[in-house]
Image (cartoon, rainbow, N blue to C red):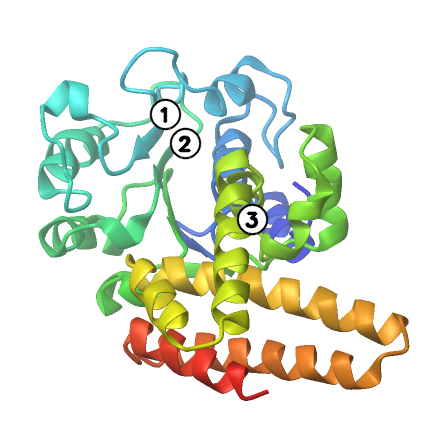
Amino acid sequence: MRGQSAAVETLVRALSSGRVHHAYRFEGPPGVGKELCAFRLAAALVCESGGAGCGECSACRRAVTLSEEEPRVPLHPDVVLVGRGVYRSVTGQNEASGIGIDQIRRVVQPRIGYTPHEGRALVFVVRDADELTVQAANALLKTLEEPPRLTHFVLITSRPHRLLDTIRSRTLPIRFGTLSDEVLGALLAERGVPLDVLPFAEGSMEFALERGTEESRAERDEFVQGAEAALAAPDFSVALKFTESQKGERAELKRRLSFFAHHLATCARARASAKAPLEAERWAIRHGLVLETIDDIEKNVQPALALEAMLLKMRDR
């Protein structure tokens, strides 16, 4: 585990003292190691050697290895993965709306009634726990309140505010932060991914890999070129057409604007290095306007109107 020393130290202390909580909530941004850490904790709990886990015994290896066939779940019988669509081939349920009650009733509750197969511990890892439907979350509550001996839960979430208050109150939070550029850079280098994606990664390995694809690079270039054309056009009609072309999710526009902000910041630095202070200031002001627009969209301003207003202001700068 790299870049999450505080979380790891907390868990190692709990394992070393034999005081592992029965229900943890691993929360933090996506792509920063929460699920990896959850499976490493599960491995330590079922490890044949005890303690903080050896990482080498059969139990440790099986706890972190998923089966090749569906459902893709850990090979160790005492490490149970719960998540939307994980058991689609077994239950026949698509679970498009989240982790349904059927999964809790057919996967979690029957298993709770038995002791661990190999005697050390029984660990449930709930992937994207904020996707639990209300019915599924309520069905899980009693088990979280009074779990059998040697039974542990790890709920993983990037959106803890979407969990029921009753679920949050019965789980102990372990917080994971964004990864530093140094850690991300090392991880990307190991995978042969160009490091120019770092400014768009937001401290997340998931985002870095997603935004390092050729498709994502093309999307960045297309948005930046479209915005620049809208600003350079003699009238505002080009800007209006560009705004109309930016349909989609609010989050998608925020991501594209973050690409544009990085581009403007790079331009401002280049002008400053070339000793062109007025030009540098102009690009810096535009950069600030993009950040304001992202903030407006986060505050629920209609995305198309926010983008249109931003371009209008920029044309006056």
Label 3, residues with CA under 10 Å away: few <14, some 14-19, many ≥20: many
Viewer-closest of 110 and 88: 88
The x and y percentages for residue 101 are: 10, 43
Q: Is residue 209 above or below residue 233?
A: above
Q: Is residue 182 visible?
A: yes
- SS type, badge 3: loop
Q: Disc 3 or 2, which lies upstream in sequence?
A: 3
Residue 264, numbered label: none
Q: Dot 1 lies on which element?
A: loop
Q: Quadrant of the C terminus?
A: bottom right
The amino acid on which the numbered mark 1 sits, given as a three-letter code, is: Asp
Q: Are marks 1 and 2 in contact (CB under 8 Å)?
A: yes
Q: Nearer the viewer, residue 164 or 212?
A: 212
Q: Where on the picture, by quarter, is residue 235?
A: bottom left
Picture layout, residue 79 above or below residue 66: below
Q: Position of residue 305 (x, y in %)?
A: 31, 78
At 81% across and 67% down in the image, what residue appears? 270
- Please identify, in this view, whether the residue under mark 1 or under mark 2 is nearer the observer: 1
Q: Is residue 170 visible?
A: no
Quadrant where the image shows the N terminus: top right
Label 2 packing within 10 angstroms: few (<14), some (14-19), many (20+): many
- The residue under the point 22% across, 32% down is 85
According to the picture, the residue beneath numbered tag 2 turns out to be 121
Asked if residue 81 lies left or right of residue 46, the reply is left
- Residue beneath disc 1: 78
